[in-house]
Amino acid sequence: MRILVAEDEPILLKTIHLRLIKDGHEVINAADGKQAIQEINDKGPDLVITDIMMPFSSGLEVLNCAKQNIHKKIRVIMLTAMGQENMVIEAFKLGADDYVTKPFSPNELAMRVRRFELNNAVRP
Amino acid sequence: MQVKFIGIHLLITLTVIFLMAILLIILSTFFYLLYKRKRSKQRDDLQRLFYLLIGKVIFNETVISEKGENNKRIIIPRKFQKKLKKRYARQVMKTVILDSKNNLTDAYGENLKILYNQTGLKKDALRNLYFDSRWYLKADAIQELSRMQQADCLHHIYRYVNHKNRYVRMEAESAMINLWGFRGLRFLNFIAYPISEWQQIKLLRQLAHFKYEEFKGIEKWLRSSNDSVVIFALKLVRVYHRFELYDAVKEVLLHPCADVRKNCIITLRNIYREDTALLLIKNYDQEGRDCKLAILDAMSEAGTEDVIPFLMEEIEHGDDEYKLKAANAIMVVKRGEGLQLLKSQPFAGSFPWNEIIVQLKGEEAG
C-alpha cells in the first residue's frame, strides 16, 4: 500500500514511517499540511494518515483534498489529541475513515492500516 | 526676552555622546541577535542529534535486556553522554523526550521512560522538586514526572498537594490522578487548601480518561471540613451515578455553606428517589436565592404530583426566574396537562405570563 503520513512531530513521523515500512508499505512523509496536499496531488497515495493540527494547512484541509481526488478513493486516518472531539466529528463529516487519539501505539495504527488493506483486497 | 544659545563645544560633545549611545545600542542588539542565532542553531543541532537517539531507542535498537524483560538498559553512545553533561543539552533532550512521550504508548513509550531515567533527567526533576525554592520549577518538575508516567515518584509528589503555592498544588493533584487514576483521589483525605472550580473540572476530565473502577472514600469526603472537597465529592457522586450514596448525600443538605448545599441539591436531582422532591422543599423557605432556584430546577427531574401545590405558589413569585422555573417543572410533572393548568390561571393573559406560556408552548411542540 502507498501511504502518506502527514505529521509535524519529527519523532512521531519517523516512528510511524519505520513501523509501516516494517509491514512492507511504501511510505511518503510530509512534515506539514501544505506538503501533504502536494504529495496527494503528485503521488496519489492509497491511504493518508494525517495529524489534525499542523502548520500551513490543517489535517482537515488535507482530508478534504484527499476526499476530492477524482482519480482514486483515498482512505484517511486522522491523528488527534485528547480534547479534540469536535474536530473528530468535523473530520467524520468530511469523510474521514478512522481516527486514532494520541498518545497511541504505532502497533495499533499498523493494525488499523492492515484492516484497510484487507478491505481493499476484498473489494474488486 | 534674551535667547541663550548652546556653545559650539557643548553641541559637539552632546552629538558625540548621542552617536556613541546609538552605536552602543546597535552593537548590543547585534551581539544579542548573534547570541540568539547561535543558541537557536545549537538547539536545532542538538534536537537533530537527539531525534537520532530517540528514534533508535523507540525501535529497540539500542535497548538491551538485563535479567529479563523488566530490567532494560539503553546503550547511550559516548558522544551523546558527553553532550548530555551540559545543562542546555539536557533541557533540549527533556523537551524532545516529553514531546515524544506525549504521542506514544506501549513499548515505544516504555523505552522513552527508560531513556528518561538513564539520562538522569528524572533525578534533575526530583532535585528541582525538593531543593529549588522557585515554585514554577517545582510545578514544572511535578508535571514532567507525571507526563513521563513516573508512578514510583508518587510518594514524592503526594506531599505537594498541600504546598503553599496553588500552582504546585494543582500540578500535584493532577499528577496523582494521572499516575494513579481513581486511586489518586485519596489526596482528598488530607488536602487543606480549597480546590478551585477550574481545577475540579480539570480533575474530572482527567478521570474520564480512566476506565471506571469503584473508589472508596466519598462518605468521608462528604463530611470533610474543606468545603471544596465536599463539593468535589458531590460532583463525583453525580458524574459516576453513585446511587448507593443517596443517604450520605442527603445529610449534606444541612451543610452550613450555601454553595455546598446548592451542589447537594444538584446531585440529589441526579440520583433522586421518590421522596427527593418533598425532601428538597422541606427547607425551601430557609434557603437563599441560588438554592431556591436549584430546587425549582430539580423539580423538573425529581418532581411528583405532591409538589404541584408548592409549584403553584412559586409561579406567583415576584421574580420572573422563579416563575419560569416553577412553570417548567409544572410542565414536566403534569406532562400533557401542564400548559392547560397554567393557561387556566387568572394571570395567564397578563405580562410576563403571556410570553412565558408562548415559550412553553413552543418548547412543548419542539
Image (spheres, grey):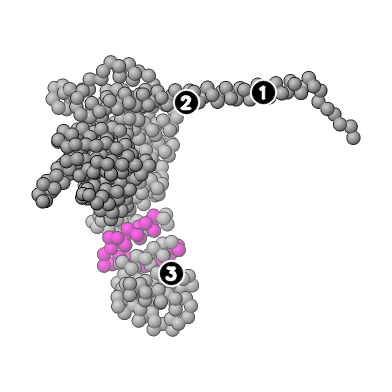
Amino acid type, residue under disc 3 in the picture: Tyr
> Which of the marked residues, 3 or 2, is nearer the chain's N terminus?
2
Residue A57 visible in this rendered orientation of the protein: yes
Q: Are marks 2 and 1 on the same chain?
A: yes
Mark 3, mark 2: which one is toward the viewer?
Answer: 2
Q: Is residue B54 or residue B133 the one in the foreground?
A: B54
Q: Is residue A120 or residue B209 the one in the foreground?
A: A120
Q: Which residue is mark 1?
A: B19
Q: Is residue B95 or residue A20 the one in the foreground?
A: A20
Amino acid type, residue under disc 2 in the picture: Lys
Residue ranking furthest to the right: B1
Q: Quadrant of the N terminus of chain B?
A: top right
Left or right, residue A58 beside residue B347: left
Q: Which mark is residue B36?
A: 2
Amino acid type, residue under disc 1 in the picture: Leu
Q: Residue A107: name its quadrant.
A: top left
Circles 3 and 1, Cβ within 8 Å, touching? The answer is no
> Considering only vertical position in the picture, is B223 above or below A25?
below
Q: Please provide percent x and percent y for residue A3.
A: 21, 40
Left or right, residue B69 beside residue A33: left
Q: Please provide percent x and percent y for residue B3.
A: 86, 31
Residue range corresponding to the magenta coloring: B260-289
Mark 2, mark 1: which one is toward the viewer?
Answer: 1
Q: What chain is tagged by disc 2?
A: B
Q: Residue B274: name its quadrant.
A: bottom left
